[in-house]
Amino acid sequence: MKLHLVSLGCAKNLIDSEVMLGRLVNAGWILTDDPAEAEIIIVNTCSFIEPAVNESIDSILELAKFKETGICQHLVVTGCLPERFREEIVHALPEVDIFLGTGAFDRIVHAVNGSSNFSKCLLPDPNLLTIQAKEAHRVRSSSHIAYIKIAEGCSRHCTYCIIPSLRGKYRSRNNEDIIAEARSLVLSGVKELIIVAQDTTSYGKDLNTSVDLSGLLESISDISEDLWIRLMYGHPESINESIIKTIATYDNICTYFDIPIQHVSSSVLKRMRRKYTRDDLYRLFEKIRETAPDCALRTTAIVGFPGETDRDFQQLFDFVEDICFDHIGVFLYSDSEDLQSHRLSHHVPQKTAKKRHDLLMSRQTDISLKNNLKYIGRVLNVLVEEKSKDNLFIGRTYFQAPEVDGITYINSNKLQSGRFARIKITDAFEYDLAGKTV
């Protein structure tokens, strides 16, 4: 029987999807990219913010049509959407046959096999879910890029964030399992390992051992020189000098620092329950640039948070101008009744928040172009991703993470996907680069 899975949301969700597919393939299921050919359709959902909730629901309703127009017998919805909205979602989406929360990913085979006495909505405590084992089979979406999840959940309680409720407390994976998985991925041909968690730089702090992120990165770095290692989803409170030095020291670890700040105003940060100050952030990014002068900086920020004044926003705007981030994602505050921030006073009108978003992104566009112009004439190592058309390939530099950053267009008549190439940059755009082989 054939099965089709749609994975929505972040890279951490993608790993869950890949592990579920691995379990299903081991159980004898055949995967198909065409939902019209599938007896079982699975949607692994995201519900972090309102646009993600809407995308999840739209995807479910669209795929539910194949129960009438295709051969789909069961529609299964997994992940954050059922975890967040609990049993009420059963009545809201009668098209769905089975819902599995974030603590039930290990039940996926039983769910699609139609085991008897299986609840239509299964929501076990995510804290009880076994952390991914090193031997877990994954059906990867890319042959040369792989994400490695080094921890699950989050123990911070930012007022705007639902993740601790959806994923449980922070739980680090065993470092030996992570290293074994990384080694296996490299042996399979992976050229870029992307280390992820909800708070990556807190890795190991919950373990009763001397394990820390610096040591883990060093061990992964030793696996191969012909490899990029990229760290995503750091945190200003947990990144330390040791981590910064390790990233700066090893040639195969990308000097790419993804550190979401969310805001810089003291009053907004206090309302968000983020325990650092604007001065802390200035010192942090100064330290990073001092240690790794050729580094790339990426961050995210939230505008329109309850209580954010024009003065608060101006502080954020000025900070972005001062730091000159290579990449920034700006999000409109997403409100919901199940968030602590919902109960805060002085909610910002959506129109005002959108105006602030557009102002900040417009300024960042200028900053990004200025940053990119400095690469013209330089020869950079580029990981070739795919052939776009005749004599044109698409790749990425070390300062371009997949999906979230820009890309590099390469003029060449012959390159191999999944390999590194030396590219001379000939042109720069607001977010992308262009070059040719040397």
Image: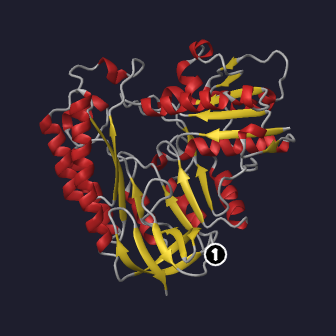
Q: Quadrant of residue 333?
A: top left
Q: Residue furthest left?
A: 311
Q: Position of residue 142 (x, y in %)?
A: 65, 58
- Helix, strand or loop at label 1? It is loop
Q: For the N terminus, which image quadrant? A: top right
Give the colour scheme shown: secondary structure
Numbered disc total: 1
Q: Position of residue 250 (x, y in %)?
A: 49, 71
Residue 148 visible in the shown view: yes
Q: Nearer the viewer, residue 53 or 87?
A: 53
Q: Position of residue 70 (x, y in %)?
A: 76, 32
| Left or right: 421, with 119 as reference point | left
User: Which amino acid is tagged 1?
Assistant: Gln
| Left or right: 40, with 338 as reference point | right
**Above or below: residue 62 compared with residue 279:** above
Q: Mark 1, residues whose alpha carbon is within 10 Å: few (<14), some, or many (≥20)?
A: few
Q: Quadrant of residue 310?
A: top left
Q: Residue furthest bottom?
A: 438
Q: Nearer the viewer, residue 338 or 217?
A: 338
| Left or right: 221, with 344 as reference point | right
Q: Label 1 belongs to which residue?
A: 416
Q: Nearer the viewer, residue 280 or 319?
A: 319
Q: Residue at x 24, y 23 (%)?
A: 347
| Left or right: 87, with 52 as reference point | right
Residue 102 visible in the shown view: no
**Above or below: residue 22 compared with residue 305:** below
Q: Nearer the viewer, residue 135 or 7?
A: 7
**Above or below: residue 145 compared with residue 412:** above
Q: Position of residue 192 (x, y in %)?
A: 58, 64
